[in-house]
Amino acid sequence: MNHPSEFYRAVLESAIEGLVVVDAGGTVHFANSSAFGLAGVTGREPIGRPVSEFLDLRDPGTGLGIELESLPAPESASAFQGRMCLLVSPAGTEKYVEVSVFSMPPWSPGMEPCLLYHIVDATWRRVAEDSIRNSNRLFNSIVENSFDAIYILRGRRYEYVNPSFCAITGYSYVELTASDFDYNVLISPESREFMERRFLARSKGAAVDPRYRIHVLRKTGEVVEVEVVTVPIGKPDDILVLGIMRDITGRRRAEREAGEASEMIYGILGAMYDSVFRFDTEGRFVFAHSPSIALITTPERFIGRHYSEILPKGVSELMNQAMDILRRGERTEFDYSLDIAGVTCSYSTVLAPIVNRGEFSGVVATVRDVTEIRRAETEQKALAEQLQRTQLFESLGMLAGGIAHDFNNILMAILGNTSAVMEEIKGPESAMQRLVEIEASSGRAVELCRQMLAYAGRDTASMEKLDLNAVIHGIEDLLSVNIPPAVKLDFILAMDLPTVDADELQIGQIVMNLVKNAFEALPETGGTVTVRTGRACFDGGSLRGFLIPAGIEPGEFVTLEVSDDGSGMESWQKERIFDPFYSTRGPGRGLGLAAVLGIVKAHGGSVRVFSENGLGTTFQVLLPVSAGPGGQPVPEAPPDRPERDLSGMILVVDDEEIVRNVLERMLVKIGYGVVCAASGMEAVNIFRKRRGGFDAVILDLAMPGMEGPEVLELLRSMDPTVRIVIASGYSPQQVEERMGNRKPDAVLQKPFRMDKLQEILGPPPGPASVSPV
């Protein structure tokens, strides 16, 4: 064929690929429509022009143009086959094309052989290849950088391992993929039998669990626990496995430690008396541990439920307020009470927010049962108040004792002078009557002093074993006479009462004062006063309701109760009923109940009051039963002293001038000579200067500087035979306690009358007079 026929041209024109005919000089003689479309050229201008002006082909890697004129000659054109090029249009758009060059006969007569450019659009194939390459790079990057160990195992030989596999096992890639590497080297002895069974099962085509755990032996000899997931790949008869292996040694250790920590936490919770709860952000229970949880409900009933569904309304309102505070990240606490199984229990709750990465994520609450603590606090408060009252009583007692002591000295002068004048006066009857009235008033003042001393606990006389019923019978007539006609007095006395160690007069004073207080509490229309005795045992707990409990030992007591059916008292009145000069009937008129408290305290007992407004009042007194048979030890008598010649002289020692003066007058009236000393030291000096020479010494107990006991000891050291009489406002028993083993010959309790003084001293030996020092 010398030139292409029309048919030949039509075939070339209709080809999908771009076809361009170029002569040996690089001139374009033909280009079909597909070539024009790929080149982005319109019109027929390229025909007859150099091919490089029609096709702008560039190398995809370097972007440099390809010189089409330098392409191989037709006879060697087959060397340029399927080359990927970048075809750039005149508009600048780029397109990947695959170019092949073939030799062909001359395009027209007289021409040399030509080249046929075969151009195929390779854009989509290039995109696909790039995608595959990118996917491979991404896959390789993921596998190579994975924290999990990834491997491909064919039979027992590793064909591929990633860096994490090398890190876990301690072997290099070269070592692991070597043809002579022993697969079993990596398997810990305790896991080899398991792995052998898996391999045999897989080799026989049996299904095996793709997920398992084994222990791997590192190159260093360290054993690590791993979790493995395997996937078979390749042909069924080709034992090729893709595996992903993860080191779970740390996780398993953490799980064990978490389990141990959890066991420890539950152990701690089990040892705690406190309850611990956790709530979510909305206030629903998510955890609960409570020793007393069964008293409220079971965990199954409230886990997952809101606290308002479980807790009483009042506690829920407290929780609402607490949640507002907790959401601000602040800790809070509150106290509340619940009635559980009929018992009121007190609780203290501390709540703290759970904050996770700055966000409020829940609440932990610790609840402590403080029922016993609150009860103890209440009791402690009551005891503190009671102690304050006791201290008040003691302070007032000291004041009363001091006043009574000094007042006794004043009364000593009044009563002594009155009795002396009554011996001398021979005046009219009216004057004598006045003196009698003065003496009677002084007697009432003396009784008031005794009440003050009783309140102060300083008027304890000699103790003896007493039958309380006998004491009451002894004053029964006196009680009946003093009670108004409208008042009924009942006695309910228990049989076979044990004895008490007590002073009969003071116990009688207790009964008198309580009965007097009872009938004065009754209205004018009258009522009933009941005196009751009994015996009872009290332990430490039951004694807490009594006054002055300090020093009282639990045990058996004789009880005295005096009740009235009057109007009773309010609680605040009961708190003050034993205060001196306090009365519920208006201004206080004396020390009656205060003296009762002092006497009871001095006897080692206690007292309490039961009273309600409108229901009357009962005073209950406890007196400890006697320790054993027999009375109290009898005070040791002064040693017998030999007879001595009497001088008729008396030494009076007292720091109060008024007392010295009245004693001097009384002694002179009796017939004694008197020397007075204003202090203990002065008395010792006088006694030493006169080398004794006194029939007796009347000695005050409490004086500034050298007190009575010391003076007695010094006088006895100079004259063991001298007779010493203690004159004091204290009771004989208190004098004995203060004197210790220094025993006086007698005790005169101030104030006293002249006849009492004469009874102690006896008649004088003969005429005597006041003698100068």
Image (cartoon, rainbow, N blue to C red):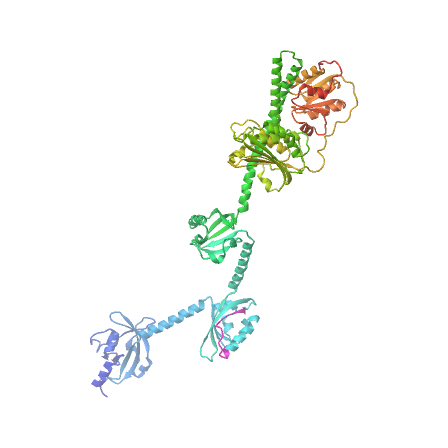
Residue 179 placed where, x, y %?
A: 51, 76
The one nearer the camera, 608 or 674, is 608
- Where residue 524 sits in the image (x, y, percent)? 52, 29
Farthest residue, direction top: 427
Per the image, is 343 magenta? no
Decide if residue 73 is in sight here: no
On whether residue 212 falls in the magenta region, the answer is yes
Instruction: Locate residue 577: give its quadrant.
Output: top right
Q: Is residue 331 left or right of residue 707?
A: left
Q: Residue furthest right?
A: 642
Which residues lie in the magenta part? 202-217
**288 relative to 43 in the view: left or right:** right
The residue under the point 45% across, 67% down is: 146
The picture places residue 575, in percent across and down from the top left corner, at 54, 34
Does residue 398 appear in this view? yes
x, y percentage for residue 59?
A: 32, 73
Residue 46 figure quarter: bottom left
Asked which quadrant contains residue 234, the reply is bottom left
Q: Residue furthest bottom?
A: 1
In the image shown, does 350 or 358 lie closer to the viewer? 350
Q: Nearer the viewer, residue 698 or 759?
A: 759
Image quarter in which the N terminus is found = bottom left
Q: Quadrant of the C terminus?
A: top right
**Where 204 sits versus 592, above or below?**
below
Residue occupying image coordinates x 64% and y 20%: 412
- Number of disc labels: 0
